[in-house]
Image: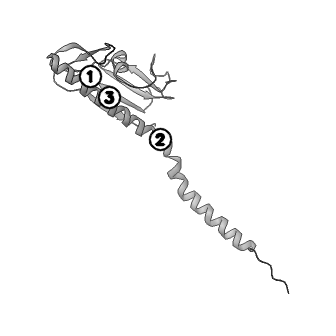
Amino acid sequence: MKRQNGFTLIELVVVIIILGILAVTAAPKFINLQSDARIATLNGAKGALQGANALVYSKSAIKGEERAAGGSVVIDSNNTQVNTEYGYVKASASDVTAVFEGDIETLADDTTKATKEWGLREGTGDVKVVPQGFSAGQSCYLLYTESSSSAVASYAITDTDC
């Protein structure tokens, strides 16, 4: 009698069921990667803005303007000027754009979505930095608040809708 090599139908069904269980268990970890990437991008933007602000503050301190409202410093060899408040970058779209890397646009209102790499929405004494595809009205942004006479500049990430 000739013997055939191969798998039985029951063996194949068992393997498919095991693979299905593994896929259902692992899928949620992979689905959340996009949100984690956006949050990491916001953290990177926060670090970049903090680093730029440290350099601006150093230049303000050299000029003796670290305790003054309404100063300005030159930040590069192209004579790019940045307005400061108590030594830190002023929270305006133009000043944050000057120290921030990337393709940036200013958003007209809280419902306008950023079509470029970053969108900036200027408030009173603060700027929201939102990633591409998001608006300032959504809860996925970096909030930069300028320095005042009693507080240093602050950075806060809101990531509930990322």
Under mark 2, the amino acid is Ser
- At horizontal 81% and vertical 82% (from top left) the residue drawn is 3
Please identify the residue farthest to the front as the structure is shown. Answer: 77
Q: Circle 2 sits on which residue?
A: 35
Query: Which numbered dot is residue 146?
Result: 1
Residue 151's place in the image compared with 39, above or below, is: above
Observer-nearest of 131 and 24: 131
Under mark 3, the amino acid is Leu
Give the mark nearer the N terminus: 1 vs 3.
3
Instruction: Please rate how many residues cluster around mark 2, counting C-alpha atoms within 10 Å: few if below 14, some from 14 to 19, many from 20.
Output: some
Instruction: Please rate how many residues cluster around mark 1, counting C-alpha atoms within 10 Å: few if below 14, some from 14 to 19, many from 20.
Output: many
The secondary element bearing badge 3 is classed as helix
Answer with the quarter of the image where residue 157 lies.
Answer: top left
Query: Which numbered dot is residue 117?
Result: none
The secondary element bearing badge 1 is classed as loop
The secondary element bearing badge 2 is classed as helix
The location of residue 121, given as percent across then percent down, is 40, 20
Under mark 1, the amino acid is Glu
- At horizontal 50% and vertical 41% (from top left) the residue drawn is 34
Q: Is residue 160 visible?
A: no
Relative side of 44 to 112, left or right:
left
Observer-nearest of 83 and 2: 2
- At horizontal 32% and vertical 28% (from top left) the residue drawn is 49
Are the residues at dot 1 and dot 2 in contact (C-beta closer than 8 Å)?
Answer: no
Quote the CA–CA distance across marks 1 and 2: 28 Å
Q: Circle 3 sits on which residue?
A: 49
Q: Is residue 69 visible?
A: yes
Quote the CA–CA distance across marks 1 and 3: 12 Å
Instruction: Please rate how many residues cluster around mark 3, counting C-alpha atoms within 10 Å: few if below 14, some from 14 to 19, many from 20.
Output: some
Observer-nearest of 123 and 66: 66
